Amino acid sequence: MKLIKPFLTISGFTFLSKILGFVRDILIAAFIGAGIIADVFFVAFKLPNFFRRLFAEGAFSAAFIPIFSSILKKKGKSEALKFGSEVLSILFFILFLVIIIFEFLMPLVVYFLAPGFANDPTKLNLLVELSRITFPYLFFISLVSLYTGILNSFNKFAAGAAAPIILNLTFIVFILTFEELFETKGHMLSWAVFFAGLFQLSFLLFAIYKNDLQIFFIKPKYSEYIKKLFNLIIPGAIGAGVIQINLLIDVILASFLETGSISYLYYAERINQLPIALIGVAFATVLLPTLSKQISNNDKKNAIQTQNRAIEFSLLLAIPASISIFIIADPIIGAFFERGQFSINDRIMSARALQAFAAGVPAYVLVKILTPIFFARQNTKTPVKIAIVCVFVNFLFNLILMHFFQHVGIAMATAIASWLNCILLLYVLLKSKEVIFDNLIKKNFKKIILLNLFFGLCVFYFKDYINLFTNYRFLNLLIFVLLSISFYTLLLSFLKIFIFSNYKLIKLR
């Protein structure tokens, strides 16, 4: 299996999804701006979305795929699919129970999620209503993550990567079509979340059927593999989801700040998530099954090489993304969101948060790369210990920095905690010799740093030209970004940092 080809497949679908996601967020920003309705809806969406990122991009896949891949290699397709069916039966029951409990206890749940809303009964009651509508999304998307993990284990990456496109299309259709049918704009957006989950699950069921992967409800047995899955998934949820836990803490604390703070952080995070998804999540999705199979084959040499190339390639993309987003944060927010109900002040406040988030982009991406290295070896205890430390550090810096910088301080604390998480993960991997840097990555790392210093100076010097055409802000941004990417690519070629064959030839033996 080649590493770059599936990465490009996932990254390509992710890019399309993000483009549609930006269309969705542009419509939401114009539709509800950054006021009370926006703050309440974003918190209601955060609740199931938090679990979505933990499951779809974190704990479930991290626990399930190595076990499923091991069964597939040792006992064949039939036994692997039987294990998948047992997991489906257990997961379905647990999710159904969780949804019922959360729906019943939603007033208590949202009080914990946004305690700052307690002083405003109208806000709090609306949040309860919207959260009850959005929360079943967790049920649908968790089953989607199961089917995606199975497909990925058979090297079928496209369907799982394409599923988020359906989420964004559903939002767009609802915003453009169904506004008059609902009590408030917040209710309309919440029902869009519900139906998006249902449509995504239907799409993945079709993909499972099309690939002749027979996953059915069966009577589950508490087998050795099921026991191992539960032992891995709970610490994995914290280990893989430390960024999401930090972002959840951000929402809780931001609820105490002035109206609009939650929205500023949401819009900034949406931009910041683009490089994380295109680079970190896409590579991690490919890396986990690839490493799991190499380790199952006892092919340590190729596993080390795969890890090095993944780290190297992610740095090639994440560092310039971080620099560029930090420098041109204001025109990015303006081009995407400043229209309709989204004001100039909203743009300025969101851009400041984006700059703080951008400082942590390389760390966010590397955490997505480093965590699967532990999970592929079925080690979830180490990441969870590190995650607990980082969550505490994030909370501490939140309390300190939000006092001086308001919502920007919250974003700064997230970046600091992510860098600490990245450094500690890398330290443990290097010390245990699970990661061994080869000469190629050592040589290229120096070049990457020097190259990006020069690239950053150029972006800063030419940033004022981004407003060349006054009435076409999005076109200005697009031209500037495309020229910057072209310039960076030429620099890579000139310094001979990126050689495609180094990545193309990473195969499973």
Image (cartoon, helix red, strand yellow):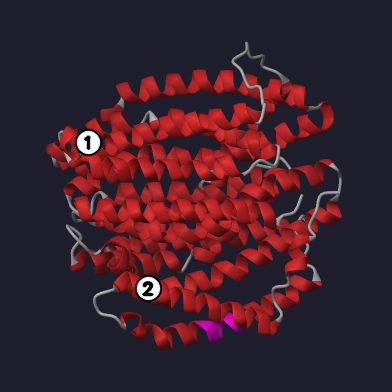
Say what amino acid the circle numbered 2 marks. Leu
Mark 2 and mark 1: span between their CA atoms?
A: 33 Å
Mark found first going from the N terminus, 2 or 1 = 1
Write down the residue under mark 1: 187
Image-quadrant location for residue 111: top left
Write down the residue under mark 2: 477
Residue situated furthest top in the rendering: 219
Residue situated furthest bottom in the rendering: 461
Query: Is residue 433 something that shows in the picture?
Result: no
Query: Is residue 4 something that shows in the picture?
Result: yes
Image-quadrant location for residue 260: bottom left
- Helix or strand or loop: what does disc 1 sit on? helix
Position of 134 relative to 324 (above/below): above
Q: Position of residue 487 (x, y in %)?
A: 54, 81
Q: From which residue to which does the magenta span run?
A: 449-455
Image-quadrant location for residue 19: bottom left
224 with respect to 94 (left or right): right
Does 317 lie within the magenta span? no
255 with respect to 219 (left or right): left
Position of 274 relative to 491 (above/below): above
- Helix or strand or loop: what does disc 2 sit on? helix
The chief SS type of the magenta part is helix
160 with respect to 95 (left or right): right
Label 1 environment density (alpha carbons within 10 Å; few <14, some 14–19, many ≥20): many
* Residue drawn at 24 percent across, 32 percent down: 128
